[in-house]
Image (spheres, helix red, strand yellow):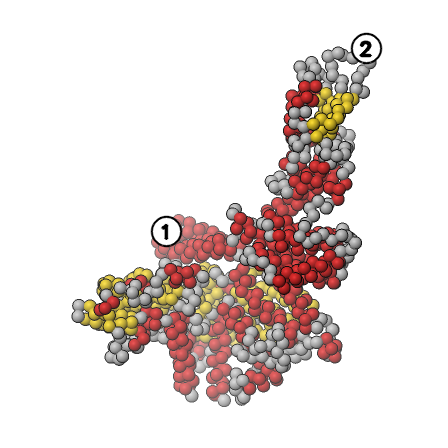
């Protein structure tokens, strides 16, 4: 991985962490303090700082360090969280975001005003820290953890402490203890040496060829533990050797542990990697652990405990190692749950799957024509698999909408302060999934709708109280699936749309003729017309009269629709309806004359034959009796001006969209068809009633019907006809 | 983004100094030419899907190795009768630079002739009238063996905005006509 790529990863990760911080802060504001959340926030800040250090982004390190200090005090309970602190930390989070954007992404530096703002924030942060001395912002103190300062090893100073008890057999095996100690002095200075002769038995019991002596050595050396241990390699089996690192090494150990590669999540291996423990020591300790497990209690003490008990590693170091081990495991668990894949690769895959579907359809067609049963069988097995692959591939791109919704917590919070309103955000259906490409494009329209609802929808507190409503306004974001589309609702409990005012304005602007009679919902939907804004006062947030029409256009570009529902005095709900995916759908293929059309299968309810009797009177009216229900229909032949004469039979495809049922009259029903959507290019951008195209197994192009637009067209035409007749 | 880069790298197809080579083709008995740099390929006419409610000069769409390409009837585009399909009818696939991105468009021609080199000095300015084609469609009149060849300005003939716009007015006209007819 090159440095650039690494930096890119860092930037992406930081954005994620910042979002996490924001979510935590907003939660902290409402909920009592909980250690885990504070910890998570601390970790987030710490990671941003640590990684920034790797890239030499000093400005980020300096600022984040101050934030981290405060968070650390919060974590330790020295500081309590209140609204003011959350506010401050939110600002800090934004500043870190700015730093990352400026320093890491574009490699620039903050301008004077921004730097000053950062300084001010850092100053306020330091002021919040109780009695603790403030570190200078630029100098992160690494060794401020209590571990480093506590000392507490068995010896003082910067000397290693070696304790060697030679086995009785050493001399018989031809080893001379003195030679080892002499050799030891070649890699360092022996500061002092004490001989422990307490093992020495009485003269009559003493074996002159046995060694009874133990040595206790203070040893000053730059060598690491493994090197020191290696000195005694030849007598390793015959002696009890303990090497205690000098206390001054503790901090270094801690640091090394913290920077361990994370290749292993075994405590012992971690300690070895950091050079604190040697392989031999670990083996011994593990054996001890096993023997304890086999002993009377039958429980297995943790390896850390064994190591501390044997004095091989200080307790503080083990604690740090345990923390590190937990981190690595967390990280591993996360890695196992998610794989980062670039969206491009995913798109490529989905395109290929699209081609596979088309090619598969071609093969199926040939297999059917050949009349070879075995081939047909094999082909349908392939087709089934292709369908599963298609669904799987599309699912890869599905993301939950919750993340998008959560971003609005902050928007709502900040904006309600700015507006001086009290508004809470409720989120529903956060786990509803939709295509990532849709999610990316829905952010802006949603933002606009939310702002609109807060600015114009929800009234000021006094007005709410006067109207007998709770002072706190509620904005609700909700999402759910409904017949192959996803519905996103932005609802407020505000004043609702003032229909009279809208109508008056529409007439003023010439959008509606004065004599026209409009239903309530039609009036509401007028707000989506271009250049329409009823806000008497234009605030800096919304109300410039651009927007709602842009929202509508953006959503239509995604093959979606938007609808507004409002009860005066009770609130407004904007309902966005979007297709689940933009790439591949299940379609239903129908034929009219020589042309083929695809109806999205999710919208198809059933197919019925248009009876001869109905055909006779169909010229006069455009509805049939569907089991006692009135079913209006659209003749595709007339709608699309297809000249070929109708076939002997005609069928009706019954579709449902947004609570509306209607029929399409077609010649032939050609069955289900996996439809890879191909855009129709800008030449056809004004073409209503066709939403795209697809390629059939034969290689021909079929057009995809835009069901909502066709239904709307039918409604509009009838309305026109009525106007003309009256 | 990538489209922009492509445009920058490739000389504009209509730039005269680069368009020394031309593909000549027949349309209603007349010879036309298009700068060769704009042309991607030439295919046989067939497998065309009509798109409803489009003006006559949009014949429909075809499947060009997996992408859906609109096909323009040049003859109707020039305000003449639509092309009669014969055995020699071809679709010339042309790349047109749009406002934001390039689009591939097919045009129906009666027959494709050959690729010719027409030196810049052999190209006359379009006549003010008389060609019975909108003058902005003509880049120039090339002289080949003593005959005039109409060199088309592909950018204008196949201007996507123009095509889409006309189609919109067409839709308006028909709906207005409907209303009148009904009254």
Viewer-side label of 1, 2:
2
Which image quarter: residue B183? bottom left
| Label 1, label 2: how far apart the Cα atoms are | 103 Å
The residue under the point 55% across, 56% down is A107
**Please, is residue A315 above or below residue A68 in the view?**
above
Q: Mark 2: which secondary structure?
A: loop
**Please, is residue A303 above or below residue B13 in the view?**
above
Q: Mark 1: which secondary structure?
A: loop
- The spot of residue B46 in percent (x, y) is 31, 64
The image's mark for residue A372 is 1
Q: Residues within 10 Å of mark 2 (few under 14, many from 20)?
A: few
Q: Is B8 left or right of A109, judged from the image as shown?
A: left
Q: Is A191 left or right of A387, judged from the image as shown?
A: right
- The spot of residue A436 in percent (x, y) is 54, 59
What subunit carries mark 2?
A: A
The residue under the point 32% across, 66% down is B15
Which image quarter: residue B162? bottom left
- Asked if residue A696 can be seen in this view, the reply is no
Marks 1 and 2 share the same chain: yes
What subunit carries mark 1?
A: A
Who comes first in sequence, dot 1 or dot 2? Answer: 2
- The spot of residue A654 in percent (x, y) is 49, 70
The residue under the point 37% across, 71% down is B159
The image's mark for residue B128 is none
Q: Please give the residue where the numbered disc 2 appears in the rendered image.
A: A204
């Amino acid at each position: 991985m090159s440095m650039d790529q690494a930096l890119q990863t860092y930037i992406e990760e930081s954005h994620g962490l910042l979002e996490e911080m924001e979510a935590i802060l907003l939660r902290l504001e409402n909920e009592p303090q909980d250690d885990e959340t504070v910890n998570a926030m601390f970790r987030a800040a710490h990671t941003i700082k640590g990684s920034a250090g790797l890239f030499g982004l000093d400005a980020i390190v300096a600022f984040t360090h101050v934030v981290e200090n405060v968070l650390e005090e919060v974590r330790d309970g020295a500081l309590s969280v209140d609204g003011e602190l959350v506010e401050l930390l939110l600002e800090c989070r934004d500043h870190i975001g700015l730093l990352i954007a400026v320093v890491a992404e574009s490699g620039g530096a903050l301008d004077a005003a921004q730097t000053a703002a950062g300084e001010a924030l850092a100053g306020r942060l330091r002021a919040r820290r109780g009695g603790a001395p403030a570190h200078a912002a630029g100098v992160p103190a690494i060794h401020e953890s209590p571990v480093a300062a506590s000392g507490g090893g068995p010896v003082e100073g910067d000397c290693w402490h070696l304790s060697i008890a030679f086995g009785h057999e050493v001399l018989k095996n031809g080893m001379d203890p003195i030679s080892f100690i002499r050799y030891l002095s070649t890699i360092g200075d022996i500061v002092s040496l004490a001989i422990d002769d307490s093992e020495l038995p009485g003269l009559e019991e003493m074996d002159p060829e046995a060694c009874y002596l133990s040595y206790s050595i203070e040893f000053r050396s730059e060598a690491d533990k493994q090197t020191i241990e290696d000195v005694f390699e030849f007598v390793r089996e015959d002696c009890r050797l303990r090497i205690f690192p000098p206390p001054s090494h503790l901090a270094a150990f801690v640091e090394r542990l913290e920077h361990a590669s994370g290749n292993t999540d075994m405590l012992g291996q971690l300690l070895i990697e950091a050079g604190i423990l040697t392989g031999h020591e670990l083996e011994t300790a593990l054996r001890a652990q096993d023997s304890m497990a086999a002993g009377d209690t039958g429980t297995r003490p943790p390896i850390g405990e064994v190591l501390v008990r044997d004095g091989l590693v200080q307790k503080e170091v083990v604690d740090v190692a345990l923390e590190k081990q937990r981190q690595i495991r967390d990280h591993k668990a996360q890695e196992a749950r998610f794989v980062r894949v670039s969206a491009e690769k995913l798109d490529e895959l989905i395109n290929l799957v699209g081609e596979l579907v088309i090619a598969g359809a071609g093969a199926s067609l040939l297999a059917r024509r050949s009349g070879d049963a075995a081939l047909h069988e094999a082909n349908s097995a392939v087709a089934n698999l292709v369908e599963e692959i298609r669904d799987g591939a599309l699912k890869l791109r599905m993301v939950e909408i919750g993340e998008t919704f959560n971003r609005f917590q902050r928007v709502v919070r900040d904006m309600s302060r700015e507006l001086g309103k009290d508004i809470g955000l409720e989120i529903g259906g956060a786990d509803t999934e939709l295509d990532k490409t849709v999610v990316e494009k829905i952010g802006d329209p949603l933002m606009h709708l939310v702002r609109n609802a807060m600015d114009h929808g929800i009234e000021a507190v006094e007005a709410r109280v006067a109207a007998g409503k709770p002072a706190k306004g509620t904005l609700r974001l909700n999402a759910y699936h409904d017949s192959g589309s996803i519905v996103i609702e932005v609802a407020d409990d505000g004043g609702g749309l003032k229909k009279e005012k809208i109508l008056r304005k529409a007439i003023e602007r010439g959008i509606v003729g004065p004599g026209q009679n409009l239903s309530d919902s039609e009036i509401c939907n007028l707000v989506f017309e271009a250049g329409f804004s009823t806000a008497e006062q234009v605030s800096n947030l919304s109300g410039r009269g651009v927007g709602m029409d842009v929202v509508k256009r953006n959503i239509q570009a995604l093959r979606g629709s938007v609808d507004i529902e409002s009860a005066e005095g009770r609130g407004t709900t904007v309902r966005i309806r979007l297709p689940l995916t933009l790439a591949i759908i299940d379609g239903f293929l129908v034929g009219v004359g020589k042309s083929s059309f695809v109806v999205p299968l999710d919208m198809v309810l059933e197919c019925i034959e248009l009876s001869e009797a109905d055909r006779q009177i169909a010229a006069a009216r455009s509805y049939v009796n569907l089991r006692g229900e009135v079913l209006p229909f659209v003749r595709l032949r007339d709608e699309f001006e297809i000249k070929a004469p109708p076939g002997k039979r005609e069928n009706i495809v019954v579709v449902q969209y947004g609570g509306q049922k209607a029929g399409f009259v077609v010649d032939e029903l050609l069955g289900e068809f996996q439809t890879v959507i191909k855009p129709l290019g800008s030449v056809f951008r004004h073409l209503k009633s066709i939403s795209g195209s697809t390629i059939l197994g034969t290689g021909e192009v079929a057009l995809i019907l835009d069901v909502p637009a066709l239904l709307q067209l039918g409604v509009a035409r009838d309305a026109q006809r009525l106007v003309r007749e009256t | 983004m990538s489209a922009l880069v492509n445009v920058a790298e490739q000389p504009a197809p209509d730039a005269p100094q680069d368009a020394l080579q031309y593909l000549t083709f027949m349309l209603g008995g007349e010879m036309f030419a298009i700068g060769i740099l704009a042309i991607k390929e030439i295919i046989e006419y067939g497998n065309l899907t009509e798109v409803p409610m489009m003006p006559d000069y949009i014949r429909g769409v075809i499947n060009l190795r997996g992408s859906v390409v609109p096909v323009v009837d040049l003859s109707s585009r020039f305000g003449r009768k639509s092309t009669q399909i014969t055995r020699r009818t071809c679709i010339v696939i042309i790349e047109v630079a749009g406002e934001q991105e390039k689009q591939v468009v097919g045009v129906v021609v009666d027959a494709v002739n050959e690729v010719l080199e027409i030196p810049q000095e052999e190209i006359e300015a379009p006549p003010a009238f008389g060609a019975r084609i909108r003058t902005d469609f003509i880049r120039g009149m090339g002289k080949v063996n003593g005959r005039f060849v109409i060199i088309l300005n592909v950018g204008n003939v196949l201007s996507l905005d123009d095509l889409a716009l006309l189609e919109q007015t067409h839709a308006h006209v028909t709906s207005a006509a409907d209303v009148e007819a009904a009254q």
